Amino acid sequence: MFSLLLAVIYIAFIGLGLPDSLLGSAWPLMVGELGVPLSHAGIITMIICAGTIVSSLLSDKVTRKFGAGLVTAVSVSLTALALLGFSLGNSFWLLCLLAIPYGMGAGAVDAALNNYVALHYASRHMSWLHCFWGVGATVGPYIMGWAIGASHGWRSGYGIVSAIQIVIAAVLFLSLPMWRKKHTESIETEEYEAAIGLKAVLKMKGVKAILLAFLGYCAFESTAGLWASSYLVEHRNVDAETAAFFASMFYLGITAGRFLSGFVADRFGDKNMIRIGVGLMCCGVVLVALPMDNVTVALAGLVVLGIGAAPVYPSVIHSTPEHFGKENSHAVVGIQMASAYCGSTFMPPLFGLIAQNINIAFYPYFLAIFVLLLLIMTERVNKICPTE
């Protein structure tokens, strides 16, 4: 039963990744039907991110009261209904309204499942959990591309993903008895006695450092992925097709890297996996920044960046109960998710301003700032919150 529950959790994380790239894939067609400027995609994205931040901050209290299983099932249902609304909506402002439950559902699932796996499963399962998110994030655009290519339109793409989410939600509701089994219930009863206030969590030693580490990692990942192609085309004179391919290889590197990390994560431990990942990220930044005429080095650097980033996020989350205590882990994971979404929401647009008004050549140096922040803050947590 425990292995079956793990399979259900993996499926839920595929569902979490499925909608993440839909808006970007469909927006060029959506703008014509909705009659809004191209830039308005940023408004919907900001609302979704705001919803994820709010639900991440509230997840500790909600999950302690209702349990991780029910919160995940309801949250996936909420996201499914929002996606169904996207497939039927014909107004930009209606989509903005639907973006609220869209984000709220995603943030709750993210926080609840990350904490649950950190508490109850080995490090390798956290790596594979986030690998499955990558599978969902990769499959989502393919579904949208198929729907558009087959002349079914972007609404069908959203509809198909909504249907998949509804099936996943049904599986989650059917799995609720497994979440309540005695071997998990005995642990959860102790954990969910009372929620910890946000102020109390922020006063804990090492929490502020780990929040900055999460912000740094997600700022790095989202900026690296979003601006890789533009950097290669505009600064390194790579043709657009090759640039797009290697930008996608960055994400493939993350997904494949997390799959492979799962086989060694328990042997090396979270602390060493983070250090190995950050070390590779540093190498990748250097390769991308090297002023060489042969762009192959820069292209290889993007792949190294993705492989290096792969083990960092899962390992930092998995180490949370050990650093801050099992009784505090859900509260800490919740605000970690909020900090992560802040990094991925605000830092890519900031680099966009730098690229537009100064020079896109600053791309690797901008990434280096966040890799350095990640390195300093994770080592600070290791020092403040030592583990065996």
Image (tube, rainbow, N blue to C red):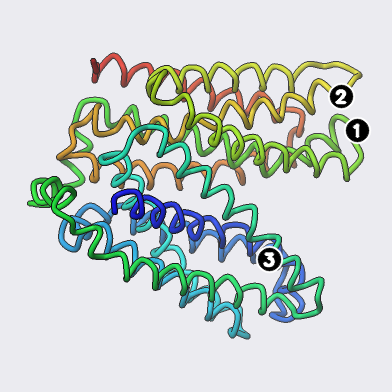
Horizontally, residue 93 falls left or right of residue 384, namely right
Tell me: residue 166, above or below residue 301.
below
Residue sticking out furthest to the front: 1
Across and down, in percent, residue 337 comes to 38, 45
**Location of residue 139 (image quadrant):** bottom right
The earlier-in-sequence mark between 1 and 2 is 1
| Residue type for callout 3 | Ile
The earlier-in-sequence mark between 3 and 1 is 3
Q: CA distance from mark 3 to mark 1?
A: 31 Å
Q: Badge 2: how crowded within 10 Å, few (<14), some, or many (20+)?
A: some
Residue 378 seen in the current view: no
| Residue type for callout 2 | Val
The residue tagged 3 is 143
Q: On the rendered image, what quadrant is the N terminus found in?
A: bottom left
Q: Badge 3: how crowded within 10 Å, few (<14), some, or many (20+)?
A: many
Which of label 1 and label 2 is nearer to you? 2
Horizontally, residue 47 falls left or right of residue 244, namely left
Label of residue 237 in the image: 1
User: Does the CB distance between marks 1 and 2 fall below 8 Å?
Assistant: yes
Residue nearest the observer in this picture, 363 or 121: 121
User: Does the CB distance between marks 3 and 2 fall below 8 Å?
Assistant: no
The residue tagged 2 is 295
Across and down, in percent, residue 284 comes to 67, 21
Residue nearest the observer in this picture, 265 or 373: 265
User: Circle 3 — which element?
Assistant: helix
